[in-house]
Image: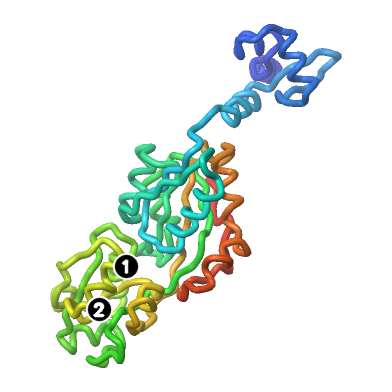
Amino acid sequence: MLRILIMNDLLTTRELADLLRLNEKKVYQLVREGGVPHVRIAGKWLFPRNHVMRWIDEHVQREKDLFIVGSDDILLARLLSFYSQENFPESQAFYSSVGSLKGIHALQRKKGQACCAHLLDMETGEYNLPILEKILSPQKYVVINLWNRRQGLIVRKGNPLGIKGLEGIIEKKAKFINRGEGSGTRVLLEYLLREHGLDQAKITGFSDEVDTHLGVALKVFFNEADVGLGIEYVTHPLNLDFIPLKEEKFDLVVPKELWLTSVMKGFVAYIDSAKIHRFSHNLPGYDLKDTGKIVFQS
């Protein structure tokens, strides 16, 4: 039985030629060039079916452009801009910042080639992996860290209301500006409120939402809100104050079927901390200590 199973998993030269729609001479040429996976048994060339199918998948011509969905992030937008400039016109990167949760659902529906996310799981306090398991399983995927970011409260220069934390928003009756449901920042806020035993209904402006971190900062800058939650970087161009609350993981999720394609390998190689330092030195609030590290492979 085992011998039958093994033989069924091994293709002959003719069977491989039929599979690839080539003549047998071309198959021998592929063997000599070391391209197609093969093994020699008793003087006969045989080809492991699973290895051959993976080899075919890795050599399929995919889109040469990148389509990334997920969370809003200024450093990622800058990275993709540099990538597009350096790889023009062969490969361009397109970025749709729809929020972490929508990004993962888009990836599930094959609406993007990769997703960036920073979703904090309410039960475990762990970033991304538990939620990816719930939504993407049984799909196979790879998670790679892009960087860590500091999230906190954004207030006007000098912090005129003297807000020190989430409790202060309620105590001072400060007008809050929120992010949309499904965004990683909104999930973080709800997690922190629960952790501190605070009622969101007591926060003035909790239902007022904007789409981006910069949108939060602008609301505070123009006195349309007293405080909001966002990343540290956006406070610097607008000369706002920042009260740090959490360092979060900002990860890239790539379907396993695309992981070894040439365009994805090229982009992953681009996620290099030394390279990113060249254009991130003036972006406070980012930490590149784990940049490029594979966090998980399913």
Q: Is residue 113 left or right of residue 297?
A: left
Q: Is residue 260 above or below residue 219?
A: above
Q: Is residue 59 left or right of residue 116?
A: right
Residue 170 horizontal/vertical position (percent)? 18, 84
Q: Would you say residue 232 is visible in this rendering?
A: yes
Q: Quadrant of residue 189?
A: bottom left
Q: Is residue 45 left or right of residue 158?
A: right
Front of the two marks 2 and 1: 2
Q: CA distance from mark 2 to mark 1?
A: 12 Å
Residue located beneath label 1 in the image: 213
Residue 166 horizontal/vertical position (percent)? 27, 82
Task: Tell me the SS state at disc 2.
Answer: helix
**Going 56% across and 63% down the picture, which residue do you hit?**
276
Task: Tell me the SS state at disc 1.
Answer: helix
Q: Residues within 10 Å of mark 1 (few under 14, many from 20)?
A: many
**Going 25% across and 78% down the picture, which residue do you hit?**
221
Q: Quadrant of residue 174?
A: bottom left
